[in-house]
Image (spheres, rainbow, N blue to C red):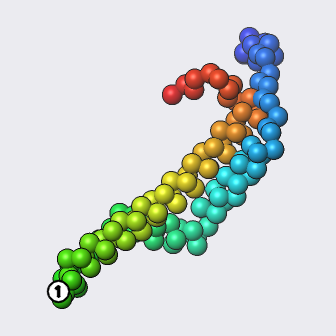
Amino acid sequence: MGSQQANQEFQPEKKGRKLVPEEIKEKRQGQVLYEMTKSEGWQIIAKWYQDRAIHTWVDPREIEGPEAEKEWKWKELNAFHSADVSRQVLEDIEKLINRSEYLGKIETGEIEEGKPMKI
């Protein structure tokens, strides 16, 4: 045990760097979004976004008349964009949370910038 304590004493202290104002803002936004994702309300909204992103389609049985094909294409295009926006919102939130965690690790020295991460 004595040698373990000696090794711990001689290990260099990790040094981070001070974040620039834009990074501080990004880090805080990610933290706020992370806290939001843990709320019950967000769990409901996230489910809506996930359902819309994955299960959005137009029922062709609901479209009738001489312009049915044109109307179906228009509705299908709008459904696609709605699904795409829902997916993008979820991805953007996840990216900002991940960026916030990364900036926190840079600030504490847990990650050194410019070096590849160990996976």
In the rendered image, the quadrant that contains the N terminus is top right
In the drawing, does residue 63 fall left or right of residue 112?
left
The image quadrant that residue 79 belongs to is bottom left
Inspect this view and state whether residue 56 appears.
no
Q: Residue at x 45, y 59 (%)?
A: 87
What number of labels is visible? Answer: 1
Residue 58, percent from left and from top: 27, 75
Residue 45, percent from left and from top: 52, 71
Q: Residue furthest bottom?
A: 65
Q: Name the foreground residue: 42 vs 8.
A: 42
Instruction: Inspect the image, locate mark 1, and give the three-letter code of the amino acid beneath it.
Output: Pro
Residue 66, percent from left and from top: 17, 86
Inspect this view and state whether residue 77 appears.
yes
In the drawing, does residue 29 fall left or right of residue 92?
right
Residue marked by disc 1 = 66
Residue 32, percent from left and from top: 70, 58
The image quadrant that residue 50 belongs to is bottom left
Q: Name the foreground residue: 5 vs 115.
A: 115
Callout 1: 10 Å neighbours few (<14), some, many (20+)? few
Q: Residue at x 81, y 44 (%)?
A: 21
Q: Residue at x 75, y 13 (%)?
A: 7
As drawn, 66 above or below 87:
below
In the drawing, does residue 17 fall left or right of residue 83?
right
As drawn, 71 above or below 11:
below
Which secondary structure lies at badge 1? loop
